Amino acid sequence: MPTLKDVELKIKAVKKTKQITKAMNMVATSRLRGAQQNMEAFRPYAGKFAEVLGSLAEKAGEEANPLLVPKEMVKKIHIVLCTSDRGLCGGFNLNLMDKAEALMEEKTGDGVTFSFTNFGKKGRNWSRKADGEIQEEYLGVVGTTFDFSIASTSGRRLVEGFLGGDYDEVYVIYSKFLGMAKQLPTVQQLLPIPAIQKEVGEGVADDQPYLAEHICEPSVDELLGDLLPRNVFVQIFSALLETSTSEHAARMAAMDNATKACNDMIENLTLAYNKARQSAITADLMDIVGGAEALKG
Amino acid sequence: MAANIRLEVVTPRKEVVNEEAQIIVAPGVLGEFGVLTGHTPFMTSLKIGTIRYTDAQGQERCVFVSGGFAEALPDKVTVLAESADRRCDIDLARAQAAMERAQKRIEDKSDEIDFTRAHLALRRSIQRIQLAESRRS
């Protein structure tokens, strides 16, 4: 039986933990709102970009740009891993790393090497132990409000690396934000750029043959050459936004659970405390009664 | 004046402009071009520079763009830029700091990639500063 003092201390400790988890939950909630707004703000740009790119790609030939052409031998695989900097968000980072591990297992073969670009400390620490070289790391990005220039800086390196033969394939692993309670670790191929589907709303496409007679300046191929690297930046930016939003959502859920667990623990401990107090009182009473009996005798 | 044309300037962070304009002049890579309502469908990439337009009230307005591309349709012009600021929103101090930073990097001359990037940064900051200073006159 724990003593009264022990249980009291324990209750105090759990109450303090609860305060922390509750505060973290509230912080995550407000950050989540900000991250969602950033995602909303990006949507018009991404939508319009996909639309323009889709219609241009349709006009240009299949192999109009080296960024579209798969390499014959895939030996050097680069993984862009987006995770959070901080923990206390449940299985969020673990799920992403599992995904990375699965991808590496799938691609492992004779002479295949891996390298990494890491967004977020958790993934960086994982990559250090993994079989591959960390070429870039960006800490303090995911989960904050960041600029498009981060995506274009890292994206430019990837494009240059791909064209220069440093990488044969580039993948990004990020957490897709599907809803408050659902975040899905996702693998997406960045380079070579997978075949681009035309992403025009179907109703619009029918009554107006889109971009059919656009004058392009400079030529379609040159425009495409300008747009395709940007497409990589857009994908990275969107992956970062999704991961940030997911991180906050995951942390919110984890902290909510932790707060609930704290409540349960406090309840049980209070019960134990009352029991201990009760048995202490009973013991005291027995003493007094025993003493009185002895005096009488 | 004929009907107005809609101008939309969109960046990854926000929609900077979404309003009616009488005429729009934008810096294409092959030269400046003007768009009135009823323009032929047209698509081009943009240089670092300034989009000038006259709004529905006849007021001249300027927007800085850091490259990107523009699509003109008969009733609408869409500009996608990595960053864009209305003239009144330009942070002069920040642009000046960026210019100094870029100049320092250019003088450094250590890395080829950084060199081209610094040049672009310098051009962006100079454009911004020029545009910001023109708002007083």
Image (tube, coloured by chain):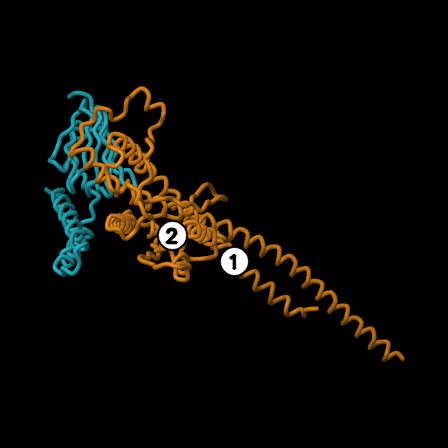
Is the residue marked by circle 2 packed among few (<14), some (14-19), or many (20+) residues within 10 Å? Answer: many
Picture layout, residue A32 above or below residue B19? below
Residue B100 lies, in percent from the top left, at: 15, 56
Q: Which color is chain B depicted in? A: cyan
Secondary structure of the residue carrying tag 2 is strand
**Residue under mark 2: which chain is it in?**
A
Q: Nearer the viewer, mark 2 or mark 1?
A: 2
User: In the depicted view, which residue is nearer to us: A271 or A135?
Assistant: A135
Amino acid on which disc 1 is placed: Gln
**Residue under mark 1: which chain is it in?**
A
Identified at 46% across, 45% down, the residue is A183
Is residue A56 visible in the rendered image? The answer is yes
Amino acid on which disc 2 is placed: Leu
Residue B128 lies left or right of residue A296; in this view the side is: left
User: In the depicted view, which residue is nearer to us: A196 or B124?
Assistant: A196
The chain displayed orange equals A
Secondary structure of the residue carrying tag 1 is helix
Identified at 11% across, 34% down, the residue is B32
The residue wearing badge 1 is A19
Same chain under badges 2 and 1? The reply is yes
User: In the depicted view, which residue is nearer to us: A153 or A115?
Assistant: A115
